[in-house]
Amino acid sequence: MDSYTGVGAAMPQTIRRYMAAAPVRFALALVSVALLALATSVGASASTRLADAELPPALEYLQYGPGSQQVASVYPSAKAGSPLVILVHGGGWRKQGPLGRLELEALSLQREDFTVVEVNYDQISPAFPLESNDIAAATRWAIANAAAFNADPANVTLLGGSAGGQLVAVAAEQLDAAYPGTVDAVVTLSGPTDFVSLIPMLGSDTLDNESFNKSVHLALGWPMLTSFAASTHSYAETWSPALHTPKSNCPHWLIFNSEAEFIPLVQAKEMYSNLTAAGCQATLNVVPGTEHAFAYFHRVKPQIFSFIRGQ
């Protein structure tokens, strides 16, 4: 998976102070967002695109939950009622850095008149249900505050890459099962979707990526160099979104995977096949080459923008 420097107990004091002051910054930034939205609606036509300097400022390190890692940065759209995009990083369910790691992707989405919420989440081993629950909680928080961010709470897309692709898939299924129609669309970039079929490939010629092998073991709470026990199999099946595609209330899916990257293409194909068999609307795009997840975002973003607008 993606490799990043972890944060936690060693988080720099400046970031901790920044997070502690989030409520004050949140209130001040919302005022600037409101004023900018008003000025835009009065002084510009709907077809006018704002320059980057005129985009609403990001609202950084807002708490969506009580945990130190339950934080999000919001990139509000300049237009009221814009699509809401929840942006989720990878890192093997075990690595994350400070927010802003996906700033370029968030800004590219914001320029297209989408409101973007980039989230961090608690990480322990085993990863589930903690991590997917955090993504669901961040989504509910973003929906509850959508109007303050110029977003439409009824137009929600979850977008994740690598481990984040698996997390948005699980969270979307959870949210729509509890409250049908909560999530309109899901975009996954190189997301593992079936741990049960993936596990026999680990350590073989099919999949010999040592870092990813370790990530899967830690995510499932499965000690390295031990056999795949029945309890681990059951746990792996529970958190494999391809094995739990909804029969109703299904969001629209846009699935990407590189043709020759370390996440086997068969994972994306299985997710696509199971979704379409369940009657869900899904599109699978195979990206030429070996790039992984957000490494190819710049190549596929026009498709993503068009997909989100269509929801």
Image: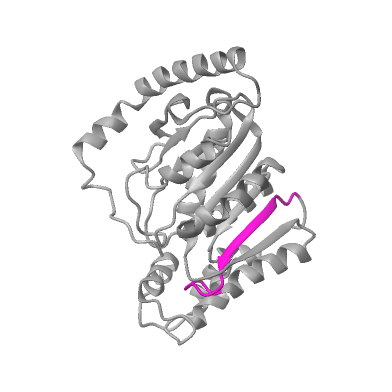
Colour scheme of the rendered structure: one colour
Q: Position of residue 239 (x, y in %)?
A: 55, 63
Q: What is the span of residues highlighted in magenta in the rendered image? A: 249-264
The image quadrant of residue 276 is bottom right
Residue at point 43% right, 44% down?
A: 104
Q: Position of residue 293 (x, y in %)?
A: 49, 60
Q: Is residue 161 visible?
A: no
- Residue 46 belongs to the span the image colors magenta: no
**Quadrant location of the N terminus in the rendered image:** bottom left
Residue at point 44% right, 57% down?
A: 90
| Relative vertical location of residue 299 with respect to residue 147 in this rendering, above or below | below
Q: Position of residue 240 (x, y in %)?
A: 58, 65
- Residue 254 belongs to the span the image colors magenta: yes
| Relative vertical location of residue 292 with respect to residue 213 in this rendering, above or below | above
Residue at point 37% right, 41% down?
A: 67
Disc count in the image? Answer: 0
Outermost residue toward the right in this view: 279
Outermost residue toward the bottom in this view: 205
- The answer to whether 32 appears left or right of 281 in the picture is left
The image quadrant of residue 11 is top left
- The answer to whether 172 appears left or right of 223 in the picture is right
Q: Nearer the viewer, residue 233 or 155?
A: 155
- The answer to whether 155 appears left or right of 38 in the picture is right
Residue at point 40% right, 34% down?
A: 63
Q: Nearer the viewer, residue 294 or 249?
A: 294
Q: Position of residue 37 (x, y in %)?
A: 55, 18
